[in-house]
Image (spheres, grey):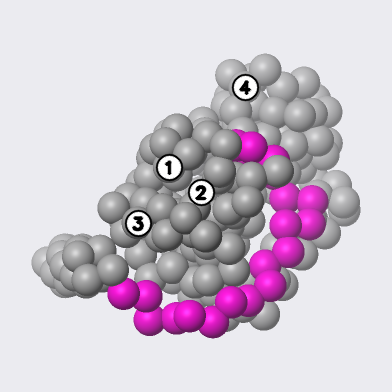
Amino acid sequence: ENKVALLESEVAALRDRLVALLGKDPSDQVVNVPIGDSPVRGNPTAPITLVMFGDYQSDYTARAQYVVQRLLATYPQRLRFVYKHYPLTQQHPLANDAALAALAAERQGLFWQYHDLLFQNSRRLDNALLLVLAEQAGLDVTRFDRDRRSLGVLERLQADEKLGSTLGVAGLPTLYLNGRLMPTWRYDYLQGQVEQLAKK
């Protein structure tokens, strides 16, 4: 089973590399990906928007965070990043709870602090750790614990999931750059796409 997973990972990496070298995107279709109430990182009025659908227990989504941070550091004025929750609960049993916890952190204005901690600990998440990380992020833990079980937070998560389903999100992370589906989250490919948009 591990050999199959390793082989699949290598094939995906080769495909990503090929796309990066050729600079081709299989989709020129632009779709509307509304930002809504989702948290924004980077310049909020930037002309280029990168939207990611992710899952806090997904290794690939965790790795893609570093790519996003590099892009934001390279294009601080031209790029903004928007995160949408799309927990794959069948593969990742705690992803749903982690998404609700992140949305609860957002209510205290500490979404990105908590978001980063979740991804830094994505391989060892459990319910007890969600509370420990809340404390580390500087949250009011009592309020946080109440908010993550609230109807409002659940509805926010469901709105992201509904949007993801409508767009046909399957594998994670799924990224849209100014409404165009990206075939990979590799840095060199995304940087090339951002550069092209920046010239327009």
Residue toward you, 85 or 65: 65
Q: Residue at x 38, y 45 (%)?
A: 67
Secondary element at tag 4:
loop
Distance (Cα) linking label 4 and label 3 = 34 Å
Answer yes or no: do the residues labelled 4 and 2 have beta carbons within 8 Å?
A: no
From the image, which quarter does the N terminus lie in? bottom left
Of mark 4 and mark 3, the one earlier in the sequence is: 4
**Circle 1: residue type:** Leu
Image spot of residue 185 (x, y percent): 37, 58
Distance (Cα) linking label 1 and label 4 = 24 Å
For marks 2 and 1, give the one nearer the viewer.
Answer: 1
Quarter assignment of residue 194: bottom left
Answer yes or no: do the residues labelled 1 and 4 have beta carbons within 8 Å?
A: no
Image spot of residue 43 (x, y percent): 64, 37
Which mark identifies residue 137? 4
Residue range (magenta): 24-44
For marks 2 and 3, give the one nearer the viewer.
Answer: 3
Answer yes or no: do the residues labelled 2 and 3 have beta carbons within 8 Å?
A: no
Q: For mark 1, what is the residue?
A: 71
Quarter assignment of residue 182: bottom left
Q: Is residue 22 above or below residue 112?
A: below
Would residue 63 be counted in the magenta stretch? no
**Circle 3: residue type:** Gly
Which mark identifies residue 56? 2
Q: Residue at x 49, y 72 (%)?
A: 181
Residue toward you, 137 or 182: 182
Quarter assignment of residue 120: top left
